[in-house]
Image (cartoon, rainbow, N blue to C red):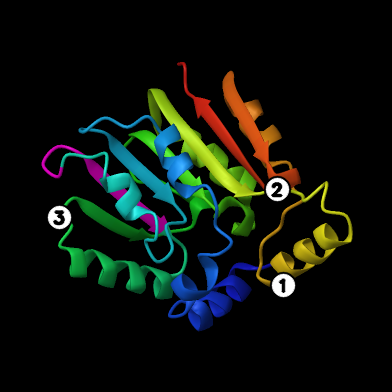
Amino acid sequence: MSQAAIQRFYRLHARIYDETRWPFLYGRRRAVAALDLRPDSRVLEVGCGTGLNLRYILEYLDPEAGTLVGVDYSPDMLRQAEKRIAARGWQNVALHQADAATLDLGRRFDAILFAFSVAVIPNWSAALERACEHLTPGGRLVVLDFGRFEKWGPFGTLFRWWLRRHHVETLRPYADKVRSLFRCVEVERWLGGYGFLAVAQKLT
C-alpha cells in the first residue's frame, strides 16, 4: 500500500466518505471521552479526514481557551473538513496537510487522537512514534480502530478482505506498538474483535 495509492483512493472517496462510512465507525464518542479533555486542552487529531470527529472534540473545549489541530495526508479529505469548519464557524480549529510518519508541528499537545486512521497509514509505527513525541508529559494518546475480527469466523475473513480493499490493514500489532511507547496503557476490545480502543498516558 503506497502513499500515492491512498491519495488516489481518497481523491475519489472524499465527497462521499461521510455518507458511506458512518455505519462502520463505532466508538468515536467513547474514544474522545477517553482523551480526558479540559476546556483549555490542546488537542491533535491525526488522520482527521473530513472532520467527522471534530464536533465531538469541540464539545469539551472552551472556544476561547481550547485548541484543536487536525492533520491528514489527503488534501481532498481536508477540503471537506475545511467546508465543515467554515459552515459551523469554528474559530479554534486549524488543519495541516502532512505525513503522520514524519510529522513535526513544532509544538506539543495535551491529547492526541487516532480514530480509524492508524490502520490506513503505511508507516503506522513511525506515525505513533511521532505522535508520542508531540505529546506533553501527562498527556493522553487514544487509538481507536478496527480489530482482527477473531470471533467472526468466515465473516471476519470477508470483512478483513473488504477493509483491505479500502486500504485498511487490520492485522498489524497496533496495540503492542502503543504498549512499547508508553508505560501506562489500557486496551479494550469489543464485539468479538470488531474494534479496539487503546488509551495511553505519557508519564514523563
Q: Is residue 134 visible?
A: no
Residue 96 image offset from top left, x and y in percent: 34, 59
Residue at image location 74% in from the left, 69% down from the top = 162
Residue 159 image offset from top left, x and y in percent: 76, 63
Residue type at mark 1: give it: Arg
Q: Is residue 70 visible?
A: yes
Relative horizontal placement of residue 117, taking residue 87 as reference (left or right): right
Task: Tell which circle, 3 or 1, labels the residue nearer the N-terminal end.
Answer: 3
Relative horizontal placement of residue 129, taking residue 1 as reference (left or right): left
Rounded to the nearest whole Å, what is the CA distance between mark 2 and mark 1?
A: 16 Å
Q: Is residue 166 above or below residue 94?
A: below
Cβ atoms at labels 2 and 1 below 8 Å apart: no
Within the magenta stretch, is there residue 161?
A: no
Relative horizontal placement of residue 157, taking residue 178 as reference (left or right): right
Within the magenta stretch, is there residue 67?
A: yes
Q: Dot 1, crowdedness within 10 Å: few (<14), some or many (≥20)?
A: few
Residue type at mark 3: give it: Gln
Task: Give the magenta part as a residue range.
Answer: 63-71
Rounded to the nearest whole Å, what is the CA distance between mark 3 and mark 1?
A: 36 Å
Toward the viewer: 141 or 24?
24
- Residue receiving disc 1: 165
- Mark 2 or 1: in front is 2
Tell me, for residue 152, which label it has, or none.
none
- Residue receiving disc 2: 147
Residue 95 image offset from top left, x and y in percent: 30, 58
Dot 1: element: helix
- Position of the C terminus, as image quadrant, is top left
Q: Is residue 83 above or below residue 85?
A: below
Tell me, for residue 91, which label it has, or none.
3
